[in-house]
Protein backbone atom coordinates (compact mmCIF):
# COMPACT_ATOMS: atom_id res chain seq x y z
CA UNK A 1 0.00 0.00 0.00
CA UNK A 2 1.30 3.45 -0.92
CA UNK A 3 2.02 5.85 1.90
CA UNK A 4 3.81 9.14 2.48
CA UNK A 5 6.90 8.87 4.70
CA UNK A 6 8.25 12.41 4.48
CA UNK A 7 7.75 15.41 6.74
CA UNK A 8 4.07 16.21 7.25
CA UNK A 9 4.94 19.72 8.43
CA UNK A 10 5.57 20.53 4.77
CA UNK A 11 1.86 19.99 4.14
CA UNK A 12 0.90 22.64 6.68
CA UNK A 13 3.42 25.10 5.25
CA UNK A 14 2.22 24.42 1.70
CA UNK A 15 -1.35 25.28 2.68
CA UNK A 16 -0.23 28.12 5.01
CA UNK A 17 -2.53 26.63 7.61
CA UNK A 18 -2.25 24.38 10.64
CA UNK A 19 -3.59 20.96 9.71
CA UNK A 20 -2.72 19.53 13.16
CA UNK A 21 -0.78 16.59 11.78
CA UNK A 22 1.83 16.42 14.56
CA UNK A 23 -0.29 16.40 17.71
CA UNK A 24 1.06 18.47 20.61
CA UNK A 25 3.83 19.94 18.45
CA UNK A 26 1.18 21.92 16.54
CA UNK A 27 0.23 23.71 19.75
CA UNK A 28 3.81 24.53 20.73
CA UNK A 29 6.32 27.14 19.63
CA UNK A 30 7.99 24.46 17.48
CA UNK A 31 5.11 24.51 14.98
CA UNK A 32 6.61 25.00 11.52
CA UNK A 33 3.73 27.24 10.36
CA UNK A 34 4.46 29.69 13.16
CA UNK A 35 8.21 29.60 12.52
CA UNK A 36 8.14 29.68 8.71
CA UNK A 37 4.77 30.85 7.42
CA UNK A 38 5.54 30.29 3.75
CA UNK A 39 5.50 27.24 1.42
CA UNK A 40 8.54 24.94 1.36
CA UNK A 41 11.08 25.01 -1.46
CA UNK A 42 13.43 27.61 -2.89
CA UNK A 43 10.53 29.56 -4.45
CA UNK A 44 8.34 29.37 -1.35
CA UNK A 45 8.78 33.02 -0.40
CA UNK A 46 8.01 34.27 -3.90
CA UNK A 47 4.66 35.63 -5.04
CA UNK A 48 2.46 32.83 -6.35
CA UNK A 49 -0.68 33.49 -8.34
CA UNK A 50 -3.06 30.56 -8.79
CA UNK A 51 -5.52 30.03 -11.61
CA UNK A 52 -9.09 28.97 -10.80
CA UNK A 53 -8.02 25.35 -11.34
CA UNK A 54 -5.01 25.86 -9.08
CA UNK A 55 -7.24 27.18 -6.29
CA UNK A 56 -9.57 24.20 -6.61
CA UNK A 57 -6.62 21.81 -6.56
CA UNK A 58 -5.11 23.42 -3.47
CA UNK A 59 -8.47 23.18 -1.67
CA UNK A 60 -8.75 19.49 -2.49
CA UNK A 61 -5.16 18.84 -1.38
CA UNK A 62 -5.76 20.69 1.88
CA UNK A 63 -8.81 18.60 2.81
CA UNK A 64 -7.19 15.36 1.65
CA UNK A 65 -4.11 15.98 3.78
CA UNK A 66 -6.14 17.18 6.76
CA UNK A 67 -7.96 13.85 6.93
CA UNK A 68 -4.89 11.84 5.85
CA UNK A 69 -6.26 10.19 2.71
CA UNK A 70 -4.58 9.20 -0.53
CA UNK A 71 -6.03 10.37 -3.84
CA UNK A 72 -7.84 7.11 -4.65
CA UNK A 73 -9.43 6.97 -1.19
CA UNK A 74 -10.50 10.59 -1.41
CA UNK A 75 -12.01 10.18 -4.87
CA UNK A 76 -13.97 7.10 -3.80
CA UNK A 77 -15.32 9.03 -0.81
CA UNK A 78 -16.41 11.85 -3.13
CA UNK A 79 -18.11 9.32 -5.41
CA UNK A 80 -20.04 7.93 -2.45
CA UNK A 81 -21.00 11.45 -1.35
CA UNK A 82 -22.28 12.17 -4.87
CA UNK A 83 -24.64 9.20 -4.66
CA UNK A 84 -26.18 10.40 -1.38
CA UNK A 85 -29.13 12.74 -1.06
CA UNK A 86 -28.32 16.33 -0.18
CA UNK A 87 -25.45 18.68 -1.02
CA UNK A 88 -22.38 16.89 -2.39
CA UNK A 89 -19.80 19.01 -0.57
CA UNK A 90 -21.48 18.68 2.81
CA UNK A 91 -21.98 14.94 2.28
CA UNK A 92 -18.26 14.62 1.55
CA UNK A 93 -17.22 16.38 4.74
CA UNK A 94 -19.65 14.36 6.83
CA UNK A 95 -18.36 11.08 5.43
CA UNK A 96 -14.78 12.16 6.14
CA UNK A 97 -15.71 13.05 9.71
CA UNK A 98 -17.49 9.72 10.25
CA UNK A 99 -14.51 7.58 9.20
CA UNK A 100 -13.39 5.35 12.06
CA UNK A 101 -9.81 6.69 12.10
CA UNK A 102 -11.06 10.28 12.29
CA UNK A 103 -13.60 9.41 14.99
CA UNK A 104 -10.92 7.68 17.08
CA UNK A 105 -8.92 10.93 16.88
CA UNK A 106 -11.97 13.08 17.67
CA UNK A 107 -12.84 10.85 20.61
CA UNK A 108 -9.39 11.43 22.08
CA UNK A 109 -7.92 7.93 21.79
CA UNK A 110 -5.12 9.15 19.50
CA UNK A 111 -3.12 12.38 19.21
CA UNK A 112 -3.24 12.53 15.40
CA UNK A 113 -5.30 10.95 12.63
CA UNK A 114 -2.23 9.10 11.38
CA UNK A 115 -1.73 7.63 14.84
CA UNK A 116 -5.43 6.74 15.02
CA UNK A 117 -5.25 4.94 11.68
CA UNK A 118 -2.31 2.84 12.85
CA UNK A 119 -4.05 1.91 16.11
CA UNK A 120 -7.17 0.84 14.23
CA UNK A 121 -5.15 -1.26 11.79
CA UNK A 122 -3.47 -3.02 14.71
CA UNK A 123 -6.86 -4.03 16.11
CA UNK A 124 -6.96 -1.97 19.31
CA UNK A 125 -10.61 -0.89 18.91
CA UNK A 126 -14.08 -2.39 18.79
CA UNK A 127 -17.22 -0.96 17.22
CA UNK A 128 -20.43 -2.06 18.93
CA UNK A 129 -18.51 -4.88 20.60
CA UNK A 130 -16.88 -6.22 17.42
CA UNK A 131 -13.19 -5.92 16.61
CA UNK A 132 -12.61 -3.64 13.60
CA UNK A 133 -9.26 -3.02 11.91
CA UNK A 134 -10.40 -1.05 8.83
CA UNK A 135 -9.84 2.72 9.24
CA UNK A 136 -12.25 3.65 6.43
CA UNK A 137 -15.33 2.17 8.13
CA UNK A 138 -18.10 4.80 8.30
CA UNK A 139 -19.76 5.07 11.69
CA UNK A 140 -23.52 5.49 12.02
CA UNK A 141 -25.61 7.30 14.59
CA UNK A 142 -25.47 5.51 17.94
CA UNK A 143 -22.34 3.47 17.20
CA UNK A 144 -20.08 2.91 20.21
CA UNK A 145 -16.29 2.71 19.88
CA UNK A 146 -14.24 1.33 22.75
CA UNK A 147 -10.63 0.40 23.39
CA UNK A 148 -10.05 -3.34 23.74
CA UNK A 149 -9.35 -4.49 27.29
CA UNK A 150 -5.70 -5.45 26.71
CA UNK A 151 -5.01 -2.11 24.98
CA UNK A 152 -6.28 0.16 27.76
CA UNK A 153 -2.96 0.04 29.61
CA UNK A 154 -1.07 1.52 26.68
CA UNK A 155 0.65 4.79 27.61
CA UNK A 156 -0.10 6.09 24.14
CA UNK A 157 -3.86 5.85 24.70
CA UNK A 158 -3.66 7.37 28.19
CA UNK A 159 -1.51 10.26 26.98
CA UNK A 160 -3.91 10.83 24.10
CA UNK A 161 -6.87 11.10 26.47
CA UNK A 162 -4.95 13.68 28.51
CA UNK A 163 -4.24 15.63 25.34
CA UNK A 164 -7.92 15.40 24.35
CA UNK A 165 -8.89 17.30 27.49
CA UNK A 166 -6.77 20.21 26.29
CA UNK A 167 -7.95 19.89 22.69
CA UNK A 168 -11.60 19.28 23.53
CA UNK A 169 -14.06 16.61 22.39
CA UNK A 170 -16.78 17.64 19.88
CA UNK A 171 -20.32 17.93 21.21
CA UNK A 172 -21.59 15.21 18.87
CA UNK A 173 -19.45 12.65 20.74
CA UNK A 174 -20.15 11.37 24.25
CA UNK A 175 -16.88 10.21 25.83
CA UNK A 176 -16.71 7.91 28.85
CA UNK A 177 -13.08 8.22 29.86
CA UNK A 178 -13.25 5.68 32.70
CA UNK A 179 -14.68 2.97 30.44
CA UNK A 180 -12.46 3.91 27.46
CA UNK A 181 -15.44 4.22 25.15
CA UNK A 182 -17.30 6.88 23.21
CA UNK A 183 -20.61 7.07 21.35
CA UNK A 184 -21.57 8.98 18.22
CA UNK A 185 -24.59 10.80 19.65
CA UNK A 186 -25.33 13.17 16.76
CA UNK A 187 -24.20 13.19 13.14
CA UNK A 188 -21.84 16.14 12.57
CA UNK A 189 -23.17 18.98 10.42
CA UNK A 190 -21.36 21.47 8.20
CA UNK A 191 -21.45 24.08 10.98
CA UNK A 192 -19.60 21.69 13.30
CA UNK A 193 -16.48 21.63 11.09
CA UNK A 194 -14.38 24.64 12.06
CA UNK A 195 -11.57 24.09 9.55
CA UNK A 196 -11.79 26.78 6.81
CA UNK A 197 -12.86 24.61 3.88
CA UNK A 198 -14.52 25.65 0.62
CA UNK A 199 -15.99 22.30 -0.31
CA UNK A 200 -17.74 23.69 -3.39
CA UNK A 201 -14.33 24.11 -5.03
CA UNK A 202 -13.70 20.37 -4.60
CA UNK A 203 -17.07 19.58 -6.16
CA UNK A 204 -16.24 21.83 -9.12
CA UNK A 205 -12.81 20.20 -9.52
CA UNK A 206 -14.17 16.64 -9.67
CA UNK A 207 -17.11 17.68 -11.85
CA UNK A 208 -14.88 18.74 -14.76
Image: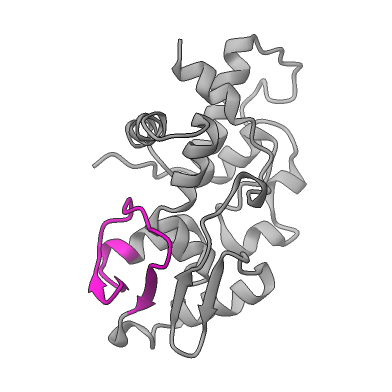
Tell me the residue at 62%/41% (across/down): 12
Confirm whether residue 95 shows in the render: yes
Magenta stretch: dominant secondary structure = loop
Tell me the residue at 41%/34% (across/down): 81
Q: Quadrant of the N terminus?
A: top left
Q: Position of residue 83 (x, y in %)?
A: 36, 30
How many numbered callouts?
Answer: 0
Q: Quadrant of the C terminus?
A: top left
Up the image or down, 173 lies above or below 149; here it is above
Q: Position of residue 104 (x, y in %)?
A: 44, 65
Up the image or down, 21 lies above or below 54; here it is below
Q: Is residue 185 magenta?
A: no
Of residue 125 and residue 174, the one placed in the foreground of this image is: 174
Confirm whether residue 111 shows in the render: no
- Which quadrant of the view contains residue 156? bottom left
Up the image or down, 187 lies above or below 9; here it is below
Tell me the residue at 61%/74% (across/down): 163
- Which quadrant of the view contains residue 2? top left
Up the image or down, 22 lies above or below 109; here it is above
- In the rendered view, how is the structure colored? one colour
Of residue 29 and residue 127, the one placed in the foreground of this image is: 127
Q: Relative to residue 13, is residue 111 drawn left or right? A: left
Tell me the residue at 50%/46% (across/down): 94
Q: Position of residue 152 (x, y in %)?
A: 38, 85
Which range is magenta?
A: 120-147
Q: Position of residue 15 (x, y in %)?
A: 64, 33
- Residue furthest front as drawn: 85
Q: Relative to residue 141, is residue 43 drawn left or right? A: right
Q: Is residue 135 magenta?
A: yes
Amino acid sequence: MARYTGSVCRFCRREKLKLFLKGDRCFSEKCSVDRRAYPPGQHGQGRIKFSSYGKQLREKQKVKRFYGLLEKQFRLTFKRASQMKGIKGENLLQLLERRLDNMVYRMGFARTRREARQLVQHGHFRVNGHKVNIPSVILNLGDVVDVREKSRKMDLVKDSLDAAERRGVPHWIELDRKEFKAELKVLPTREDISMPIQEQMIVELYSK
